[in-house]
Image: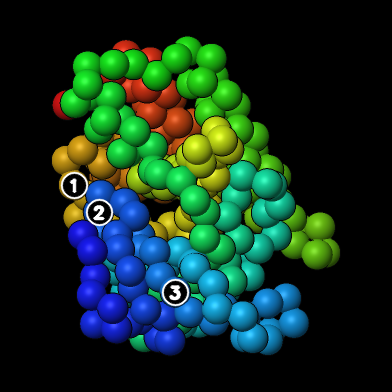
Amino acid sequence: REYGSGMTKIGDYTILRDIDSLGRLQLAAGYPPDQFGNRSEPKLVILLQSQQHCTPERMHAALTKSAQAKHSVLIPVLEYIESPAAIVMPYIHGTTLRKILDCCNETSSLVFADTVLAIGSEIVAALHAANDATTPDGDPLHLVHHHLTPDDILVTPEGTVHLLGVGLSEFCQEPNLQLHESVYVAPELLNNQLSDHRADILSIGLILYELLSGKPLHK
């Protein structure tokens, strides 16, 4: 979906086009803050819109925690827009794993096994780093993704892998998961039960299975 110039804005950012298949992730243009809070340079950014209600207080608390997870695969958050609720992240030139899977299905092709291994290794390492993250005082945070799907993974033309949404499940999760997304979610989450990092392990396993086999384990 393409947006006309100046027709759609979130905060001070102009939406250019959708990035994912769910319409929640957009390419936008604006003046994001640098590390000193200055907004002097126009840049492309990625906007992740909230899929459900989350108070600004809870969102800022979640962002503070998620910022403690340090790994090159994890996409950092530049700022949070309260209304309409959206997270601003650096622009990554790439495509979602969902679009790669759709392309493979359309062409009846499979992803090379060594490529799947590389993607899986990077995502697992990032999830491990998030789960091991601590507060500045050393208290464990046990950050998880909780609703990991192929739309949360970006792959660049060079093969670099990036992951978004870790530690931000209250903001990112779909209130009503689409059928093709629910196949990656742990049963306890679908039943509104408590979960931990094992839900992420199941999700990435299901994603890698689909990459290797060309079809989801569950339909």
Residue under numbered circle 3:
29
Left or right: where 60 falls relative to 70: left
State the image coordinates of residue 14 (x, y, percent, origin top left): 37, 79
Labels 1 & 2 near each other (Cβ < 8 A): yes
Q: Quick check: 185 above or below 105?
A: below
Residue under numbered circle 2:
22
State the image coordinates of residue 44 (x, y, percent, origin top left): 49, 68
Query: Which residue corresponds to the image point at 74% horizontal and 55% vertical from the top-left?
Result: 134
Name the foreground residue: 123 vs 174: 123
Q: Earlier in the sequence, mark 1 or mark 3?
A: 3
Residue under numbered circle 1:
178
State the image coordinates of residue 68 (x, y, percent, origin top left): 70, 60
Left or right: where 126 falls relative to 87: right
Tell me the kind of residue under disc 1.
Gln
Q: Earlier in the sequence, mark 3 or mark 2?
A: 2
Tell me the kind of residue under disc 2.
Leu
Tell me the kind of residue under disc 3.
Ala
Query: Callout 1 environment at 10 Å: few (<14), some (14 to 19), or many (20+)?
Result: few
